[in-house]
Amino acid sequence: MNSSLRKPLVAGNWKMFGNRAEAARLVEGLVASGAGSGPAEVVVCPPFVYLADVGRQLQGSGIGIGGQDVCAEETGAQTGEVAASMLVDVGCRYVIVGHSERRALYSESDDLVARKFAAASRHGLVPILCVGESLQEREDDATRTVILRQLDAVLSMSDIGTFARAVVAYEPVWAIGTGRTASPAQAQEVHALIRGRIGEKDATIAASLRVLYGGSVKAVNAAELFAMPDVDGGLIGGASLKADEFASICAAAGR
Ligand code: PGA
């Protein structure tokens, strides 16, 4: 992080873990930690069914809420889906789109992710667009191609202006939940690639775009990752389920 244009952001992706009581305890711990009153912006993304409760509990804490996914459609016969307008309705400011688990387990294509990004943007939500290569792709030297393909799919559907209110998260698939983190240099290389691509369209937007790193970020490795010039915070999975650990990561992002 080296730009005063970009306020660091730490987003917790709870995935499909926990229950109502555990969510309440986690939020209690987070509020008590004061994570929301530091220099970094902090948001948690609980499962849909807990959003309203968690949002109420976080009121006044400075910590925001976001969805883990969103439907590409506006409204209608879409059993099981949640619209962007509904996320706004329960107080979300952010939504994760194109997480690698959605892409891999639910066959979300680049095109569908781009439509979800557009739906979120239309409703004033800040999309956290996830991009990342698999281990095979990295070993095949295809990292650059994959990242640019995923990014370009969104750029071809949404005007560059939408990136003024968007966040990109670089999440190498091989680092998610594996305990294997990208080195700060590996992260920096891809973050610079992402910012560079956005910069080809609009230098001002690129300079203010927050690019988060995600993949086995923990309190012990957060500071060195966040010290990289193009790493503006993190998207945190496992470590966001522990209040103290997550609070330490938020503190590292604010330094
Ligand atoms: P992890 O997950 O921190 O548990 O690796 C990150 C993510 O999937 O967003």
Image (cartoon, rainbow, N blue to C red):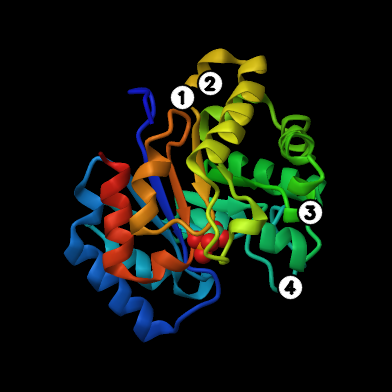
Residue 3 locus on image (x, y percent):
37, 23
- In this view of the protein, which residue sits in the foreground, 213 or 62? 213
Q: Amino acid at mark 1?
A: Ser
Q: Residue at x 34, y 50 (%)?
A: 42
Between circles 2 and 3, the one closer to the viewer is 3
Q: Residue at x 68, y 41 (%)?
A: 118
Residue under label 3: 136
Between circles 2 and 4, the one closer to the viewer is 2
80 up-or-down from 200: above or below: below
Position of 85 with respect to 33 (left or right) is: right
Circle 4: element type: loop
The tag on residue 205 is: 2
Circle 2: element type: helix
Which badge, 2 or 3, comes first in the chain's sequence? Answer: 3
Label 3, label 1: how far apart the Cα atoms are = 32 Å
Label 2, label 1: how far apart the Cα atoms are = 5 Å
Which of the image's four quarters has the C terminus?
top left
Residue under label 4: 79
Which badge, 4 or 3, comes first in the chain's sequence? Answer: 4
* Distance from mark 4 CB to nearest ligand 1 atom below 8 Å: no
Q: Residue at x 78, y 40 (%)?
A: 141
Label 2, label 4: how far apart the Cα atoms are = 36 Å
Q: Amino acid at mark 3?
A: Gln
Residue under label 1: 208
Residue 81 shows up from this direction:
yes
Residue 191 locus on image (x, y percent):
56, 33
Position of 57 with respect to 109 (left or right) is: left
Position of 193 with respect to 219 (left or right) is: right
* Distance from mark 1 CB to nearest ligand 1 atom below 8 Å: no
Between circles 4 and 1, the one closer to the viewer is 1
Q: Amino acid at mark 4?
A: Thr
